[in-house]
């Protein structure tokens, strides 16, 4: 468990108490999931947290990075690209086009909020969230 950041948080806690992983707060360059703070890019599903997901900026996102999320078999993938929405290189999008999954790119704060909404609706969602420039 990491120490809490000293910057103000945007609280994301919902009223539901569903079992599983969801975002509780978003700070500058980190997030809180349950009692733990994460400062590096991560993948989250209701059942799994994979810390230290390799991409730190959208320009470094690879097909292999997205395949790590696809392997978790979500129905929808969210990709948080940091403080602003940035799309990955076109070859990355082409490389996953045949996966048959919905995938949305958005800034990381929006990805955290959207993940929580979909989680609360009982959807099988996965998010890859880049945190280094929130």
Image: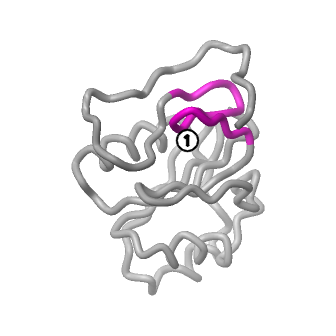
Residue 92 image offset from top left, x and y in percent = 63, 74
- Residue that carries the numbered disc 1 in the rendered image: 107
In percent of width and height, residue 61 lies at: 70, 64
Left or right: residue 118 compared with residue 112: left
Query: Could you say where residue 50 lies in the image, as x and y percent from the top left?
Result: 62, 59
- The kind of secondary structure the magenta stretch mainly shows is strand
Q: 45 or 107, which lies in front?
A: 45
24 sits to left or right of 15: right
Quarter occupied by residue 113: top left
Based on the picture, tell me whether residue 50 belongs to the magenta stretch: no
Residue at x 48%, y 44% (from the top left corner): 111
Viewer-nearest residue: 56 or 49:
49
Mark 1 is surrounded, within 10 Å at the Cα level, by few (under 14), some (14 to 19) or many (20 or more) other residues, namely many
Instruction: Name which quarter of the figure residue 123 lies in.
Output: bottom left
What element does badge 1 sit on? loop
Determine whether, in the image, residue 63 is placed left or right of residue 96: right
Q: Is residue 28 magenta?
A: yes
Quadrant of the snapshot with the N terminus: top right
Q: Residue at x 72, y 21 (%)?
A: 5
Q: Which region is colored magenta?
A: 25-39
* Left or right relative to 17: residue 89: right
| Residue at 56 percent of width and 41 percent of height | 108
Name above or below for residue 44 compared with residue 8: below
33 in relation to 97, above or below? above
In the rendered image, residue 87, in percent from the top left (x then y), is placed at 60, 57
């Amino acid at each position: 468990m990491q120490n809490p950041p000293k910057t103000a948080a945007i609280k994301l806690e919902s009223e539901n108490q569903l079992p599983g992983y969801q975002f509780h707060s978003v700070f500058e360059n980190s997030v809180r999931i349950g009692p733990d703070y994460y400062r590096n890019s991560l993948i989250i599903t209701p059942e799994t947290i994979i810390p230290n997901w390799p991409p730190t900026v959208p320009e470094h996102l690879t097909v292999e990075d997205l395949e790590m999320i696809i392997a978790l078999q979500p129905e929808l993938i969210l990709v948080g690209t940091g403080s602003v929405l940035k799309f990955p290189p076109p070859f990355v999008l082409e490389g996953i086009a045949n996966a048959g999954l919905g995938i949305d790119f958005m800034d990381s704060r929006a990805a955290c909020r959207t993940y929580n909404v979909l989680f609360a609706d009982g959807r099988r969602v996965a998010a890859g969230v880049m945190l280094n420039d929130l």
